[in-house]
Amino acid sequence: MNIKAGGFLAGLLTASLLWSAVCAGESTAPQGEKLPLYEYGIVGLAARVPHYSGSDEYQTYAFPIPYFVYRGEILKADKEGVRGIFWRYKQFETDISLAGNPPAGDDTVRKGMADLNAIFEVGPALNYYFFEYGERDSFFFQATLRAAFSVDFSSGLEIEHQGYVSDLSFIFRDSRIFREQKIRFHVSTGVRFADAAMNSYFYEVSQADVTPNRGYYQAEGGYGGLQVSGSITKELTPNFSVSCYGRWINIDGAVYADSPLVSIHNNYIAGAMLVWKFGESESREP
């Protein structure tokens, strides 16, 4: 991709959100023993992601990023985001949902069109826990609503609202089944929806961008596809762990599936990371 430097920096910022999906380096502990109140370290991340859902072109990112985990009674900051700061009642809990998409340019199907800037998404999430063993073991339904913003550094910081995205997901995470092997994993599946403005950002073709091979297209809001994800983390030593992550995205039946900017209906995201924990608190979680 030929992406201007500022856009590339925005891409790194957005792609760094992938480390949360690949499973942050939380400590493992014998069942019943509480985890440290906080821990910190650095993550070496490598991820291969499509330019956008429906694109047949991919970009690979590899870089280090810092991480910090905090497990307070009211505030929790970990691989699931910032949690418990709004409301919690019985099996319900609210938190903050984060997501993003790296920038893209010079795609074959988008040739001659404006580059896509990095997208940063943020908004509330509502979780319903079917059961909850603890921080590392739970099964829950999550509904999110995020506002999406494009980020561009080419002529100073420019942030522009692009629309809204919603995910409905079932998430299962476990550290018990393979506890003796010091392995934990998560699996999740869900569907995505987006409004017309968000889908237009990726899939609309204006009259000015029409070519003999690319027809006019006006995007609509609605169903945006199915996603199935999974990750596995192995603790090598108390301070080092390795993780791998995968996601399958299928857009059959999506409202934008017939856009001329859609080349394929199945995409895959793959990532791996090495977590090095520098330190942790002597105090334990509440």
Image (cartoon, helix red, strand yellow):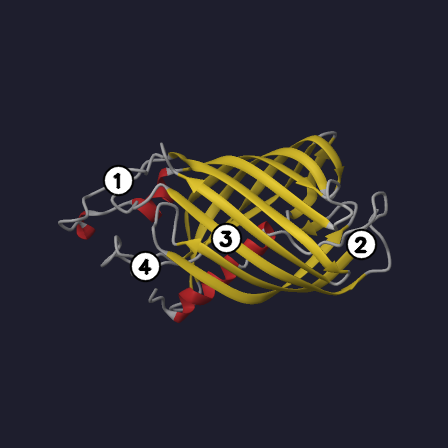
The tag earlier along the polypeptide, 2 or 4, is 2
User: As shown in the figure, which amino acid type bears the numbered disc 3?
Assistant: Ala
Q: Secondary structure at mark 1?
A: loop
The tag earlier along the polypeptide, 3 or 4, is 4
Depth check, mark 3 against mark 2: the one in front is: 3
Question: In the picture, residue 281 is in which quadrant?
Answer: bottom right
Name the residue that disc number 4 marks. 115
Kindly check if marks 3 and 4 are in contact, taking CB atoms under 8 A apart as contact: no
Residue 37's disc is: 2
The Cα–Cα distance between marks 2 and 1, rounded to whole angstroms, is 50 Å
Label 3: few (<14), some (14–19) or many (≥20) C-alpha neighbours in 10 Å:
many
Q: Is residue 120 visible?
A: no
48 lies left or right of 138: left
81 lies left or right of 121: right
User: As shown in the figure, which amino acid type bears the numbered disc 2?
Assistant: Leu
Q: Secondary structure at mark 4?
A: loop
**Residue lying at 68% horizontally and 51% vertically, measured from the top left:** 78
Q: Is residue 109 visible?
A: yes
Residue 270's disc is: 3
Name the residue that disc number 1 marks. 218
Picture layout, residue 253 above or below residue 123: above
The Cα–Cα distance between marks 3 and 2, rounded to whole angstroms, is 31 Å
**Residue lying at 35% horizontally and 38% vertically, measured from the top left:** 196
